[in-house]
Image (spheres, helix red, strand yellow):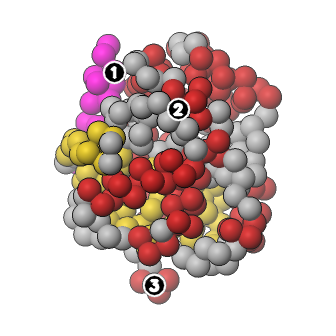
Amino acid sequence: MKPTNYRQALIERMGTPVLQKTIRAGNVTTAYLEAGEGEVVICLHGAGAGAVTWYPSIAALAQDFRVIAPDIVGYGESDKPDAPYDKPFFSAWLASFMAALKIPKAHIVGLSQGGAIALQFVLEHPEMVDKLVLVDSGALGAKPTLGALFGMIWLNSAPSTLANCFYSRYILFNPKNRDPNHGHYSVEVIKGIGGKKAFSQGKGAAVTPIPEDSLRQIRHNTLIIWGEEDRLFGLEYGERAARIIPHATLYSIPNAGHLPLMDQPYWFNKALLGFLTDSSDT
């Protein structure tokens, strides 16, 4: 099956009208998904696949918000240029993306590496962020175990169904909780032209730790969501971040791994929507 077919299958599973669009963000042609109306929520996926990673949550968010989920530069259907793929690079792309869409301010939700990007962005452009949500976020000091690191390298250097199956055990509490089309799409994106660049040229720079002093500068209302069984980035890093970031609250989800939105979509969406719709936090 073509990568676009796996992607389309995930979009159809979302169960809500979703627009598929592209826009020029700086020098990067960026593909993105859009659904719903209201205040803007921008969802940043992790280091793999693309915007369709948010398939369990877009419909729930779209009930109250205008949801925009981009294929981050280097992933999905977006451009994959030669670049450093570090936090400043991704943050600059996000600023250009929001400017191109004429969005002056939005709630930012970042998953894994997307969380690292969200952290860099809120530090560089605090005026452009309303509420901040970090989901099993990178850049908080966590380092993958040897097994997880091996799986990550295997998948990104020699992508295959077998490599994806091996790595799945480190990012999901139960790999069966993930739609198979997401795994297939992830593999095909890496196999595609430029699909290895974010990993090979970035060399992990996007998730290097942000200093504690910088984290203490974040004054935004922040929700940290973490899967209690995360085998990639342990729960203790979410707990630590909740103590450091001034206005942060931790919500941990049992029987969930690195992708709690797939392992436990009901509880994940409930926590996310509860936080974003709570006017007492504003």
Three-letter code, disc 2 = Ala
Q: Tell whether label 3 touches label 1 (CB within 8 Å).
A: no
Q: Residue at x 37, y 40 (%)?
A: 71
Instruction: State the SS at label 3.
Output: loop
| Residue with the mark numbered 1 | 3
Q: Is residue 66 visible?
A: no
| Residue with the mark numbered 2 | 198
Quarter of the picture holding the C terminus: bottom left
> Residue 184 location, x and y as percent?
44, 21
Residue at mark 1 to residue at mark 3: CA–CA distance: 41 Å
Mark 2 Cα shell of 10 Å, populated few (<14), some (14-19), many (≥20): many
Three-letter code, disc 3 = Thr
Three-letter code, disc 1 = Pro
Q: Is residue 240 visible?
A: yes
* Disc with the residue nearer the chain's start (2 vs 3): 2
Residue at mark 1 to residue at mark 2: CA–CA distance: 18 Å
Mark 3 Cα shell of 10 Å, populated few (<14), some (14-19), many (≥20): few
Asked whether 169 falls inside the magenta stretch, the response is: no
| Residue with the mark numbered 3 | 282
Numbered range of the magenta stretch: 1-16
